[in-house]
Amino acid sequence: MSQITRHQLDGYLDEALTDEEMAAVEKGLRESEALRRLLRVIVTERDRGEHSIGAIWRRQRLTCPSREQLGSYVLQVLESELQDYVEFHLKVIACPYCLANLADLQHLHKEPKTKTQARRKKFFESSAGYLHVARGK
């Protein structure tokens, strides 16, 4: 990352860059007063509510699949076009939010059945107990 762009600074503020890109931006900020000034301008604009459509789009993660869709992706049960899009989003865009969500879902998917059943039982018991107390009021 030789020349750090405004777009990359936006991604840096949104924590939407890869670890390597974040490190490169931080290094650039340490070494360049001009880059630090640009970052201050961006932060000031955000504080005033001045946002580009692209920035809003990225911050709100409008192109990100839902957790339910990511779960269906793990199970390979999405329609082929959506499956392709999610794969593109994960592998090409490399969205850090979705990659973290995917890793969590893959971990849960690989859990032993006994652990999954115990977690479900615990959730049910805590919810049932809460509902029982709430009804008694």
Image (spheres, grey):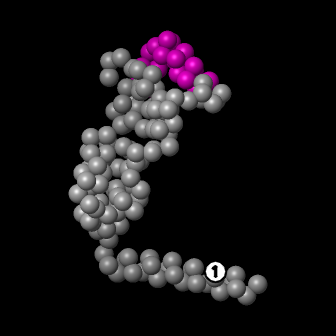
> Percent x, y for residue 107?
33, 63
Task: Reply yes or no: does residue 17 show up in magenta.
Answer: no
Q: Secondary structure at mark 1?
A: helix
Circle 1 residue: 130
Position above or below: 22 against 128: above
The residue drawn where x is 63% and y is 30% is 49
Which amino acid type is marked by label 1?
A: Tyr
Judge the density around disc 1: few (<14), some (14-19), many (≥20) Cα neighbours within 10 Å.
few
> Percent x, y for residue 115?
37, 77
Confirm whether residue 20 shows in the render: yes
Task: Kindly report the secondary structure that dominates the magenta region of the rendered protein.
Answer: helix
Confirm whether residue 74 shows in the render: no
The residue drawn where x is 28% and y is 49% is 85
Q: Quadrant of residue 79?
A: bottom left
Position above or below: 31 against 119: above
The residue drawn where x is 64% and y is 82% is 131
The residue drawn where x is 50% and y is 12% is 33
Position above or below: 128 against 71: below
Q: Which residues are magenta?
A: 26-44
Count of numbered labels shown in the rendering? 1
Judged left or right of residue 49, residue 59 is: left
> Percent x, y for residue 78?
28, 62
Position above or below: 111 against 117: above
